[in-house]
Amino acid sequence: MRQMPHARAAQAIAGLAMALFILTGHAQTAKPTGRQSQSNTPLAVKAVIVTMFETGQDTGDTPGEFQHWVEREKLDTVYPLPAGYHNVRANARGLIGTVVGVGTARAAASIMALGTDPRFDLTHAYWLVNGIAGIDPNDGSIGSAVWAQRVVDADLAYEIDAREIPGDWSTGYVPLFKLRPYEQPAQNRGEMYALNAPLTEWAYQLTKDTELPDNARMAAYRARFKNYPAAQKPPQVLKGDTLSGGTFWHGKLLNQWANDWVKYWTEGQGNYVTTAMEDTGIMQSLTFLSNAKKVDLNRVMVLRTASDFDSPPPDMTAAESLNRNAEGAYRASFEAYESAYRVGSKVIHTLVDNWPTYRTVPPKVPPH
């Protein structure tokens, strides 16, 4: 249904509030709502929902990434987590969720705080990283949900300003310990994390036909992406790789860099589809926690949903498009929150409903 002007204004105001909240970097220290846990027995966790930000309170106001999970899954029991960005919330079915904060550093620290907290037994838990992202218009459209097969780091590198690079370089971004862009061989020191492929495929097959929210406003915007067939399609569930970096980059030239960078670190096997800011920090902490036998790294899934494109349509400059993003007015933020929950909850419900089976062995698609 087409939004009326006052509805568009409300969305812009909510987006601005979200942007201001993210930029301040303040942890959510408000008094928690819900029951506070008093148990001394570690909670046997079946699944962890990891979100990056919430625009206000966890319930009852304009939703961000976490609110749908709190309200719809009845995450009513609160575990204060002073060593992390946000409190942990839980329900009676063994599901917990939290907000780890925007950016690699906050996310990594928050995951480590959660993973080493003695109140939680995470040894059999599945992890769902569930947040919004920008999407490559060559691969999909806004509102889409993308299961990550690999997480690639966008920060670990040398950099020369583009105005000073040699004439035969395509970018001023150079892998660490290399002499020029994309110098072979790629030597992965934490720049790329490959997720459990059978688990990711299972999640994709389970959710690929999920109906995702769409409306006339989204359709009108994606129609502006002339010569981008994938961008003009309605939202859908996809697979692809995500690029994680602390800088909110934008534009078709950096889109080309993102595709090349992901190709380099995946040795030509990967395909950049979504951009994010926290996932390599999360994966690094989970890797360390796995080494300590506190989590199972084979039970990690990353689902990013597209709130906007990573590049402008052909009739808009990169600066004009970025200015709109900087104001928090993402083209499909609320639809992306809904897509994230609709797709992610199918996986979580299936795991929890079949816990006697999936506690021991992660699911995978049966052979044909």
Image (cartoon, helix red, strand yellow):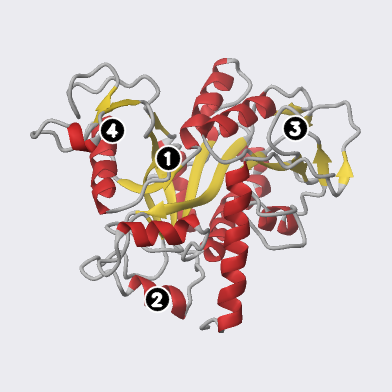
Quote the CA–CA distance across marks 2 and 1: 28 Å
Of the two numbered discs 3 and 1 on the same chain, state the one appearing first in sequence. Answer: 3
Q: Position of residue 185 (x, y in %)?
A: 19, 21
Q: Answer yes or no: do the residues labelled 1 and 4 have beta carbons within 8 Å? A: no
Which of the numbered marks, if any, corresponds to residue 247? 1
Q: Answer yes or no: do the residues labelled 3 and 2 have beta carbons within 8 Å? A: no
Q: Please, what is the three-letter code of the amino acid marked with disc 3? A: Ala
Q: Answer yes or no: do the residues labelled 3 and 1 have beta carbons within 8 Å? A: no
Of the two numbered discs 3 and 2 on the same chain, state the one appearing first in sequence. Answer: 3
Which of the numbered marks, if any, corresponds to residue 219? 2
- Residue that appears at 68% across and 63% down: 62
Depth check: 345 or 165 in front?
A: 165
Which of the 4 image quarters holds residue 234? bottom left
Quote the CA–CA distance across marks 3 and 2: 44 Å
Which mark lies nearer to you, 2 or 1?
1
Q: Please, what is the three-letter code of the amino acid marked with disc 1? A: Thr
Callout 1: 10 Å neighbours few (<14), some, many (20+)?
A: few
Q: Which residue is mark 4?
A: 266
Q: Is 82 rendered above or below residue 55?
A: above
Q: Position of residue 45 (x, y in %)?
A: 71, 35
Q: Please, what is the three-letter code of the amino acid marked with disc 2? A: Ala
Of the two numbered discs 2 and 1 on the same chain, state the one appearing first in sequence. Answer: 2
Secondary structure category for the residue under label 1: loop
Which of the numbered marks, if any, corresponds to residue 44? 3
Q: Disc count in the image? A: 4
- Residue that appears at 28% across and 40% down: 270
- Residue that appears at 60% across and 37% down: 126
Quote the CA–CA distance across marks 4 and 3: 35 Å
Which mark lies nearer to you, 4 or 2?
2
Secondary structure category for the residue under label 3: strand
